[in-house]
Amino acid sequence: MTHATDPTAHRLIPVVVLDDAALARPLAEQLLADGIGVAEVTLRTPAALDSIRAMAEVDGLLVGAGTVLSADQVDQAVDAGAQFVVSPGLHRGVVERAAERGVVVVPGAVTPTEVMTALEWGITTLKFFPASTYGGPAALRALSAVFGTVRWVPTGGIGPHNVDEYLALPSVVAVGGSWMVTTALERLSEAGR
């Protein structure tokens, strides 16, 4: 079941990496203009938390934090305005802190052992990252045959050339990628913003 702060309510989740927080608000507005109501801002740059703050001020955009590696980063992201967190791996501290803070968490898992651990922790929506490296749609089909209750959000190596192949899988509820951000930033540049 999805709700207002569940990023998987959106089929496409832009993965945002910004070095300049001044671009965050215009990018958020452009994503909305492009019909995209969600953004995952990765905590890979010093501008990430300020970018989350700026994007969280834009009405109608669900903003989350990606590349969340620790419980402290969960706190920092939520304090900045993140409404969900995404982690590249399965980390108990991240999962528990997200639950304590009342935000949706989408941790990563690519092996049967990781999936079983996630299910033991009550998590049924998982990030599959990096999707292209770990076998792409074929791997997801195989995992879904065994773990039929798991909902997947593949990210990594996905773009306009293969997104439909992922979205065609019944177990895939959303796909993450940076190509949507690149397109939005190009539109901003063309508009001189």
Image (cartoon, grey):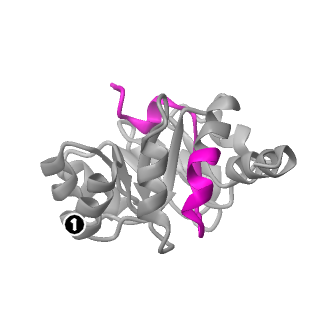
Q: Quick check: can you spot residue 52? A: yes
- Residue 92, percent across and down? 20, 64
Question: Percent from the top left, x then y, of residue 153?
Answer: 50, 46
- Kind of residue at badge 1: Ala
Magenta region includes residue 156: no
Q: Tell me the residue at 65%/28% (across/down).
A: 35
Q: Secondary structure at mark 1?
A: helix
Residue 158 in the figure: left or right of residue 70 = right
In the displayed structure image, the side of residue 158 where residue 111 appears, left or right:
left
Asked if residue 111 is positioned above or below residue 192 in the image, the reply reads below
Q: Quadrant of residue 116?
A: bottom left
Q: Return the residue nearer the eye: 164 or 24.
A: 24
Residue shown at 55% from the left, 32% from the top: 37
Q: Residue at x 62, y 37 (%)?
A: 29
Q: Nearer the viewer, residue 102 or 55?
A: 55
| Callout count | 1
Residue 180 in picture, x, y percent from top left: 70, 46
Left/right placement of residue 115 relative to residue 144 reads left
Instruction: Please rate how many residues cluster around mark 1, counting C-alpha atoms within 10 Å: few if below 14, some from 14 to 19, many from 20.
Output: some
Q: Which residues are magenta?
A: 1-27
Residue 154 left/right relative to 52: right
Q: Quadrant of the N terminus?
A: top left
Q: Is residue 24 magenta?
A: yes
Residue receiving disc 1:
71
